[in-house]
Every structure is written in structure tokens, then in C-alpha cells.
Image (cartoon, rainbow, N blue to C red):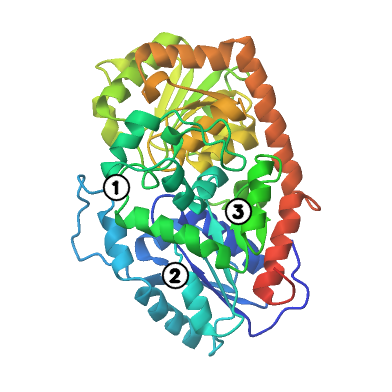
């Protein structure tokens, strides 16, 4: 357990979550860790009811961490419009920051009138800095960036990128003429290209709610008391140094899945589908694990190509696939591959990636998944879809060299066979695993007592307790 030194009994920290995708989980982990380290401080966690329910399934929070539901802006019976996947975010942003103000007022009353002494938030919620200032002079704002730091750097440099690269109508012209332009003019970004950037920076809909939110975030983060990053020192040292120069203070506390692992609940079965028992029967490094996270899924055509590739490659595979998507698999696929394949609705991913039988991870390259794969020393086969996933995939395959990407960015039968063959059965694949294992070992050293990430978390505790400099 870390210690924050002298703590103020009346300290009260507001924690503001972004309730979409996998954003809330890392912030929840950070809040749990801070609350455990500062038991005399009140922590109030504000999130949508739906997201809070997901975080709290079967778990106990520290006694000084309380959860509050805030309005998500949705009406009763709301259904997601598949043609406008950002609609939920748009509706949520329409009721912010008023929903958080309402929640904070309730939390202050519940905490015996203890006013807010610090605001911790998801970095997306740039207005949290304004809320902190409203709470009083000197109230710190501490945002957590949950994604990869290359994408954070891109958001910080959005105006420079738009000036240097330029933008076309809806950004489309940029992709046609400058997609392969390298970003070496930005610190630490050599080897990445314009095409790898998240949408909304120089291509895509630059005026969407999400693009404008991230642009404003990049302008506001340098004003924060301290910025917390879910990474560790050795991954991207040049970008780490640049961000430290941009921010008042910058604390690298990752990987959060190692530093602050989820609580264990002995009464719950952590492996209801029997994935780990199935892996126990297979040779070391032989299995391809396939999962594209809880939000994304491949287009129907690619899903079928992926299935055909898994059937043709000959390697044992574990595939985490939602039940509703199984109808899109080729006829007879499950029956033909049941001797060496296991398809489940959910898998305990960190445990699967830590299992010695897992030799490759086919992933969308969400940052949490990348961190978990490195922690397990497992090379990746990358099929990114949106946001920072392309930058993460480029970093994994071309810069860290612990994985491969698909040609033209899409899965085909032959592409799946070739990618898995390269990772599981080649000399270069063996070297990928060695490099991944080395990064995993560095990650474990960072989170041990005295390690860089553990020390960084102590620094964050001191900020939120008001007992130290940022």
C-alpha cells in the first residue's frame, strides 16, 4: 500500500468518469487505489448508472469510496442508432457539466458537508478543470489519460498537425494525398504516419462533438495540476519527456492492470467458460487468442474471413465472440474446429494472456488490451478499427516490433493464416515474444515497490491529499 503522508480528514475528492467504452474501468481502478492509500479521505465517484452497475458487479469498494449515478442524458426506451454511434456521447455531453454539479452537491451533503478539495477525472472531461476552479482557489485538477500516449501527443499537437499537414473537405483529401506522410516533425513520433492518427484531427468529421471535445481537451490539459498516464517509463521515453515538458506535472502509473488489479471475489467463478482449464491441456505458446474487446466487432465479411483463416491455419485457438455474432460464422465452422478451437461468449482476458499456452493475441489494439498483452509477454496480431487503435497497432508492429498488422488493414483468410504463422511459427515470431516478454518484465518492475509507476502513484496520492507538490 502506498502512503500519502499527512492526510486531511476533511479532504474530499470528486472522481468524474466518462461512461463509454472501456474508459470508466481504469479510472475506477485508480480511484480504488487512491482510496485504499488515503483511508482518511472521502472519494465520490460520479458515473452513469449503467456504467456504475458494470463496474460494481460482485465487488466491494473501500469504505471511503462512494458511487453516485449522474444523468446520461438518455430518455426512457432510448435505442442506439447504428448510423450515429456517437449519439449517446452527444446526449451525455449535452447534460454535462450540470449532471456532475448536481452529483457533487449530493455527495457533499452525504460527506457531512465536506467540500470538494480535489477533482480527478477522465481526461476527456476537459471541463473538470473549470469545476475544480469553481470549488475554490487551489483545488487541484488531476485528469487520467486512459489510452496510449502517442494519441495523447497527437491531440496536444492538433493545431500544429492541421497547419503542417493541412485538412481537406471533411479531411478526405488528406488521406488521399498525405496518408503515408510520416510524423517525425513531432517529438517521438517518427515511424508513425498521418493515416495512423485518430479521426477528427486532420481527417474525418473535424466538427463532430467528439472531435471538438478532444481538440478542447488537448488545449486544456496543460492547465491541469498533474496529468496521470496509464503507461510506464520505458515504452516511449521521447514522448514521455515531451509531455513532461508540456504539462505542469506528469505521472506515469501504468500498467494500471498490474499496479491496481481488479479485486478478487472468491465466491465468483472467474472462468465460467472453462478457458483456463482448456488452455492447461495445450502446449506452451501454441494458442491464438482472439478478442476485439467489448465494444467493437469486425464487419460480417471479415468475421467470415477470420473464421476461415482460423480453420485453415491449423493452430489451436480461443475466440471470445458474442453469442449474437455466431450466426455470421461459416456453416459448420464450430463443428469442424471443435477439436482444437474453443469459442466462448466471454474470457478472463488478463488471465488468458498470462497463461503459458497463449502464444498470440489477435486484437483491436485498444490500449487496455495492449497493456494486458505486454504484461503477459504475448505478441499481437493487430486489426484496429478506430480512434487511437491505429496508432497503437503501428506502435506494436513497427516500433516495438512485438506484433504484425494486416496488409491493407483488413482481415482475409490468407492474411490470418500468414499473420498467425509469422507470430506462432517463425524465428521472427520467437523474437517478437522475447521483446514482448522484456517489456512485460519492465512493466512488472515499474509497479513493484520502489518502481517508477509505484512511485508515481505515491506522488498522485500526495497531490490529492494536499500534502505534496504535483
* Residue 310 point in image, percent of width and height: 41, 16
**Cα separation between marks 2 and 1:** 22 Å
The residue positioned farthest toward the right in the image shown: 450
**Cα separation between marks 3 and 2:** 18 Å
Badge 3 or badge 2: first in the primary sequence: 2
* Residue 143 point in image, percent of width and height: 55, 63
* Residue 403 point in image, percent of width and height: 55, 24
Residue wearing tag 1: 205
**Cα separation between marks 1 and 3:** 27 Å
In depth, the one of 92 and 151 nearer the eye is 151
In depth, the one of 439 and 469 nearer the eye is 469
Relative to 52, residue 71 above or below: below
Relative to 67, residue 288 above or below: above
Badge 2 or badge 1: first in the primary sequence: 2
Instruction: Tell me the number on the disc at residue 229.
Output: 3
Residue 378 visible in the picture: no
Quarter that holds the C terminus: bottom right
Tag 2, which secondary structure? loop
Eye-nearest disc, 1 or 3: 1
Amino acid at each position: 500500500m502506498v502512503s500519502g503522508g499527512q492526510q486531511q480528514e476533511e479532504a474530499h475528492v470528486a472522481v468524474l468518469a466518462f461512461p463509454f467504452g472501456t474508459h470508466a474501468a481504469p479510472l475506477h481502478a485508480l480511484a480504488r487505489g487512491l482510496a485504499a492509500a488515503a483511508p482518511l479521505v472521502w472519494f465520490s465517484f460520479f458515473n452513469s448508472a449503467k456504467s456504475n452497475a458494470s463496474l460494481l458487479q460482485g465487488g466491494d469498494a473501500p469504505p471511503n469510496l462512494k458511487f453516485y449515478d449522474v444523468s446520461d442524458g438518455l430518455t426512457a426506451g432510448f435505442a442506439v442508432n447504428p448510423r450515429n454511434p456517437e449519439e449517446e456521447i452527444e446526449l451525455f455531453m449535452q447534460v454535462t457539466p450540470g449532471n456532475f454539479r448536481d452529483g457533487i452537491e449530493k455527495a457533499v451533503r452525504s460527506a457531512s458537508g465536506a467540500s470538494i478539495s480535489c477533482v480527478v477525472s477522465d481526461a476527456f472531461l476537459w471541463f473538470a478543470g473549470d469545476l475544480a476552479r469553481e470549488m475554490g482557489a487551489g483545488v487541484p485538477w488531476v485528469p487520467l489519460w486512459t489510452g496510449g500516449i502517442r494519441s495523447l501527443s497527437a491531440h496536444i499537437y492538433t493545431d500544429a498537425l492541421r497547419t503542417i499537414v493541412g485538412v481537406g473537405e471533411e479531411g478526405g483529401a488528406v488521406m488521399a494525398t498525405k496518408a503515408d506522410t510520416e510524423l517525425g516533425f513531432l517529438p517521438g513520433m517518427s515511424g508513425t504516419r498521418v493515416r495512423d492518427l485518430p479521426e477528427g484531427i486532420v481527417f474525418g468529421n473535424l466538427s463532430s462533438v467528439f472531435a471538438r471535445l478532444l481538440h478542447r481537451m488537448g488545449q486544456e490539459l496543460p492547465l491541469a495540476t498533474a496529468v496521470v498516464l496509464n503507461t510506464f517509463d520505458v515504452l516511449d521515453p521521447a514522448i514521455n519527456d515531451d509531455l513532461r515538458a508540456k504539462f505542469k506535472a506528469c505521472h506515469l502509473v501504468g500498467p494500471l492492470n498490474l499496479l491496481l488489479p481488479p479485486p478478487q471475489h472468491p465466491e465468483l467463478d472467474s472462468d465460467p467458460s472453462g478457458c483456463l482449464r482448456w488452455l492447461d491441456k495445450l502446449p506452451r505458446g501454441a494458442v491464438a487468442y482472439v478478442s476485439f474487446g467489448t465494444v467493437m466487432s469486425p464487419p460480417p465479411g471479415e468475421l467470415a474471413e477470420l473464421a476461415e483463416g482460423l480453420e485453415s491455419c491449423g493452430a489451436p485457438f480461443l475466440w471470445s465472440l458474442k453469442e449474437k455474432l455466431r450466426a455470421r460464422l461459416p456453416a459448420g465452422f464450430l463443428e469442424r474446429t471443435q477439436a482444437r478451437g474453443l469459442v466462448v461468449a466471454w474470457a478472463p482476458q488478463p488471465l488468458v494472456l498470462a497463461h503459458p499456452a497463449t502464444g498470440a493475441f489477435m486484437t483491436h489494439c485498444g490500449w487496455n488490451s495492449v497493456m494486458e498483452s505486454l504484461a503477459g509477454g504475448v505478441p499481437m496480431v493487430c486489426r484496429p478499427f478506430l480512434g487511437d487503435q491505429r496508432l497503437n497497432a503501428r506502435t506494436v508492429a513497427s516500433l516495438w516490433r512485438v506484433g504484425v498488422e494486416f496488409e491493407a488493414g483488413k482481415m482475409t483468410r490468407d492474411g490470418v493464416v500468414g499473420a498467425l504463422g509469422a507470430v506462432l511459427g517463425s524465428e521472427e515470431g520467437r523474437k517478437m515474444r522475447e521483446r514482448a516478454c522484456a517489456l512485460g518484465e519492465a512493466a512488472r518492475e515499474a509497479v513493484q515497490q520502489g518502481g517508477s509507476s509505484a512511485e508515481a502513484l505515491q506522488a498522485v496520492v500526495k497531490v490529492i491529499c494536499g500534502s505534496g507538490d504535483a
